[in-house]
Image (tube, rainbow, N blue to C red):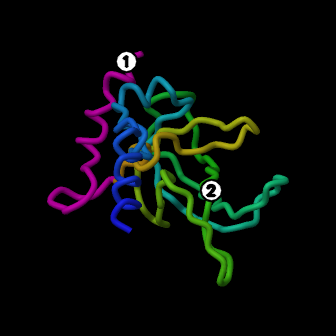
Amino acid sequence: MMSTQRGVFALLLLIPAGALAMQVQTTRPELCGLSHHVVVAEVTDISTQWTDDVAGGIERIAHVAVSDAVVGPPVVQLELVLPGGRIGELAQVVEDVPNLVTNGRYLLFISPDMSGKLNVIGGEQGAIRITPAGARVGETLTQALASVEVCRAK
């Protein structure tokens, strides 16, 4: 038993540290460069459905009302696809996909996938929750916009 534990530990030491991290830390200017849209938006509705691809799975469709377009063309609404979700008793969890909530306000970094569906990129880093000053989580609108001001200038 002890030799098995040592063997597993030895194998873990051979894995580069970066490979153990699921999400690559990316700066907001880097996310801006990868995004087709960077917007401040409020989630107006989220629905869950089965995917229409061959692999199957569950996805959430989030409709967002855009109040400010930092990068990309001006838009009023966007439909985002978030892999994973729950249908009845069946849940599919997908790592590095932000968990948006209805009526939540976010700074979102968005790009289309290979099929053209819009996705939030950068995992949780790509969906910054906008909250009132003094809140324990999230950022104020002023803080969030200041962090991407360099992106607006491009």
**Amino acid type of the residue that numbered disc 1 sits on in the rendered structure:** Ala
Q: Quadrant of residue 18?
A: top left
Q: Outermost residue toward the top?
A: 154
Residue drawn at x 34%, y 55% is: 6
- Give the numbered dot on residue 153: 1
For disc 2, the marked residue is 83
Q: Residues within 10 Å of mark 2 (few under 14, many from 20)?
A: many
- Above or below residue 101? Residue 89 is below
**Amino acid type of the residue that numbered disc 2 sits on in the rendered structure:** Pro
Residue drawn at x 37%, y 33% is: 26
Please provide percent x and percent y for residue 57: 72, 62
- Above or below residue 48? Residue 127 is above
In this view, the residue in front, 30 or 153, is 30
Q: Which residues are magenta?
A: 130-154
Please provide percent x and percent y for residue 126: 43, 43
Residue drawn at x 29%, y 41% is: 144
Q: In which quadrant will I find the C terminus?
A: top left
The Cα atoms of the two marked residues, 2 and 1, are separated by 32 Å
- Above or below residue 90? Residue 116 is above
Please provide percent x and percent y for residue 21: 39, 44
- Residue 152 located within the stretch drawn in magenta: yes
In this view, the residue in front, 34 or 94, is 94
Mark with earlier residue (2, 1):
2
